[in-house]
Amino acid sequence: MKNVAKSMMLIGIGVGATMAYQKYSKPVMKKMEKFANKTMKKMNKELEEMM
């Protein structure tokens, strides 16, 4: 009985993680892309100022 409960819990965690990934993957990727672009622009600006 204990093993069944443990298996059910792990399946539930897996389903929850999958659903969260499907729902939030696009917004997170967009935010990461914005952050990367902002960082790259800042680095390019600093490099231009050095030259």
Image (cartoon, grey):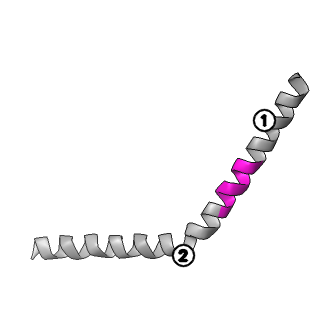
Q: Quadrant of the C terminus?
A: top right
The span picked out in magenta is: 30-37
Percent x, y of residue 3: 12, 71
* Membership of 38 in magenta stretch: no
Pointer 2 or 1: first along the chain = 2
**Residue at far left of view:** 1
- Residue drawn at (77%, 48%) of the image: 38
Tell me: residue 30, above or below residue 20: above
Q: Disc 2 designates what residue?
A: 23
* Membership of 35 in magenta stretch: yes
Amino acid tagged 1: Met
Mark pair 2, 1: CA separation? 32 Å
Helix, strand or loop at mark 2 = helix
- Residue drawn at (73%, 56%) of the image: 34
Using the image, tell me which numbered label, if any, was put on residue 10: none
Helix, strand or loop at mark 1 = helix
- Residue drawn at (61%, 61%) of the image: 29
Percent x, y of residue 33: 68, 56
Q: Disc 1 designates what residue?
A: 43
Q: Quadrant of the N terminus?
A: bottom left
Amino acid tagged 2: Lys
- Residue drawn at (42%, 72%) of the image: 18
- For disc 2, the neighbor class at 10 Å (few under 14, some 14 to 19, many from 20) is few
Residue 31 vs residue 9: left or right? right
Residue 12 vs residue 2: left or right? right
Percent x, y of residue 24: 56, 70
